[in-house]
């Protein structure tokens, strides 16, 4: 292991301490919102099941889909108006607010002390990149944990999806999709996209002001809500638009994963190239 | 150790902050940068430690070009403007965090550096509760703890009491005897005159004057 790689670990420790542990309140707030939204959804869904006389309970993925279902593409010809899933929008907007600002903030505060000791700006950037991955992982762990707790409290602790709830609340027809396919399309794909967009906007915050990078991220989320196009990567985070549940759609798991991996790699290498030339002032 | 700054120019947002600067710094000397606020002292310090890239020109350290042959000086301790530390950690823990990156020094060295600037290494007080002077002392301790061959101190005497100023003077002088290079900037001209061998006056990004004091025996 080279000296520079060895020096990465203290940087990661610094980022975990400074960027996650000391900012625990932001993650606690996210957990609180996840639990609250699960409570509200459970009340509505259980009321629907009882009033319809349908047997069956809510599973973990019903709570996950409550956020990741997203909404159908905006149809200008219909009279239904604009529909936006507030939970889906809020989930990603909050995630971007957690990950976009840290790198540039830390650069102003302590980058010179760390970079001069590590002797490499790229290693410093690698530390920030890993921090970003860890931050997204923690965010998803909290989300899945809240979904598991909610399904244990209001349904049964099972990964199964209730097809009636899916059809009524999410406009999703399971089409006999397997559990594995549902997990990939409704959890792993949004997770992969989250890793990619978080790192992309963190990289962008090195070039433009972090607040502009964040606003741009919000614009991308909003654009995806109203325009169903594979180039708008947030489309891959909406299960209602996935080819698994809407065969006519162009939003496939394969394309989503390829886009996410490409964006992730681009963000890392572009960030490394930018930081090499960037003045630490 | 020899640092050569060759025709160094730095433009920031269409402003020329360093203009075609050429300067040679050698071991066994204490160099003092003086000039008004915004004259380019701190920027020149950043240039020497490789934190900024030149618009033109280069910095050589022992013949190796910064940014091409080496990314940063091999052994450098820096205090530039407000040192950034983790607010919830104690002074010792903050320094230990930094020291672990290079892993060259042990806890004893860290404690010794803290004591030399008048800080108690056993003090559990978090950095956020530190006074301005204590923060400055910790920044100096961070710069000197790894005994770097190149020590860069930007306004090190800010917010310090007289007793600590004397301690820092002693530390700076000890670096000269160890055949290291010290670069410091200070608004107090008397302080610069009393400590430095070579005084470099900077005005609007240019070196306006270089004064070799009587202490600079190496030049005689």
Image (cartoon, coloured by chain):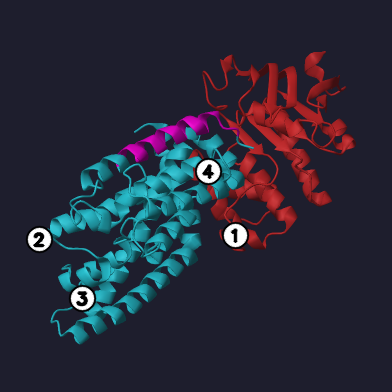
Chain colours: A cyan, B red
Q: Nearer the viewer, residue A120 or B95?
A: A120
Q: Residues within 10 Å of mark 4 (few under 14, many from 20)?
A: many
Density class for disc 3 (Cα within 10 Å; few <14, some 14-19, many ≥20) is: many
* Picture quadrant where residue B77 is located: top right
Are labels 4 and 1 on one chain? Answer: no
Element on which disc 1 rests: loop
Q: Residue at x 15, y 68 (%)?
A: A160
Residue B154 tag number: none
Label for residue A58? 3
- Whether residue B191 appears in magenta in the rendering, the answer is no
Between the C-alphas of marks 3 and 4, the distance is 40 Å
Which of the two marks, 2 or 1, is nearer to us in this view?
A: 2
Helix, strand or loop at mark 3: loop
Question: Disc 3 vs disc 1: which is toward the camera?
Answer: 3
CA distance for labels 2 and 1: 65 Å
In screen coordinates, is A235 left or right of B206? left
Q: CB under 8 Å between callouts 3 and 1?
A: no
Q: Which mark is residue A205?
A: 4
Answer with mark 3 or mark 4, whichever residue precedes in sequence: 3
- CA gap between label 3 and label 1 equals 55 Å
Q: To which residue does mark 2 refer?
A: A176
Q: Is residue B107 visible?
A: no
Circle 2 or circle 4, nearest the eye:
2
Q: Say the numbered circle drawn on residue B122.
A: 1
Question: Label 3 to label 2, Cα distance in Å?
Answer: 18 Å
The magenta span reads A261-279
């Amino acid at each position: 292991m080279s000296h520079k790689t060895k020096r990465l670990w203290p940087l990661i420790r610094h980022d975990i301490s400074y960027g996650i542990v000391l900012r625990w309140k932001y993650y606690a707030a996210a957990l609180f919102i996840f639990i609250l939204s699960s409570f509200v959804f459970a009340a509505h869904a259980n009321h629907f099941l009882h009033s319809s006389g349908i047997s069956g309970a809510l599973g973990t993925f019903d709570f996950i889909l409550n956020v990741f279902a997203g909404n159908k593409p905006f149809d200008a010809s219909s009279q239904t108006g604009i529909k936006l899933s507030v939970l889906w929008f809020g989930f990603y907007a909050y995630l971007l607010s957690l990950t976009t600002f840290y790198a540039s903030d830390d650069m102003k505060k302590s980058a010179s002390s760390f970079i001069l000791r590590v002797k490499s700006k790229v290693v410093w950037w690698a530390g920030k990149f890993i921090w970003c991955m860890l931050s997204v992982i923690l965010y998803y762990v909290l989300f899945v944990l809240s979904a598991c707790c909610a399904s244990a409290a209001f349904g049964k602790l099972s990964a199964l999806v209730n097809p009636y709830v899916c059809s009524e609340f999410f406009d999703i027809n399971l089409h006999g999709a397997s559990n594995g396919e549902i997990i990939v399309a409704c959890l792993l794909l949004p997770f992969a996209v989250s890793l990619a967009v978080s790192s992309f906007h963190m990289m962008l915050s090195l070039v433009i002001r972090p607040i502009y990078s964040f606003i741009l991220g919000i614009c991308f989320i909003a654009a995806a809500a109203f325009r169903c196009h594979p180039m708008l990567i947030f489309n891959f985070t909406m299960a209602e638009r996935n080819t698994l549940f809407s065969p006519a759609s162009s939003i496939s798991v394969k394309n989503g994963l390829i886009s996410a991996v490409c964006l992730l790699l681009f963000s890392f290498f572009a960030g490394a190239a930018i930081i090499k030339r960037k003045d630490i002032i | 150790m020899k640092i050569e700054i060759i025709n160094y120019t730095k433009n920031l947002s269409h402003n020329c902050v360093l203009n075609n600067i050429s300067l040679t710094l050698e071991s066994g000397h204490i160099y003092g940068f003086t000039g008004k606020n915004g004259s380019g002292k701190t920027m020149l310090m950043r240039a020497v430690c490789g934190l900024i890239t030149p618009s033109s020109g280069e910095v050589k350290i022992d013949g190796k070009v910064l940014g091409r042959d080496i990314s940063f000086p091999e052994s450098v301790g820096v205090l530039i403007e407000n040192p950034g530390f983790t607010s919830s950690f104690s002074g010792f823990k903050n320094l230990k965090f930094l020291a672990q990156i290079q892993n060259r020094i042990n806890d004893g060295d860290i404690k010794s550096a803290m004591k030399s600037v008048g800080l108690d290494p056993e003090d559990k007080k978090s950095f956020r509760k530190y006074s301005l002077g204590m923060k400055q002392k910790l920044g100096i301790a961070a710069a000197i703890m790894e005994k770097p061959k190149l020590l860069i101190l930007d306004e090190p005497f800010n917010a310090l009491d007289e007793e600590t100023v004397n301690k820092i003077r002693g530390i700076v002088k000890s670096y000269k005897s160890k055949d290291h290079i010290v670069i410091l900037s200070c608004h107090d001209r008397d302080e610069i005159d009393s400590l430095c061998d070579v005084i470099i006056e900077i005005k609007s990004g240019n070196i306006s004057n270089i004064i070799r004091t009587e202490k600079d025996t190496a030049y005689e």
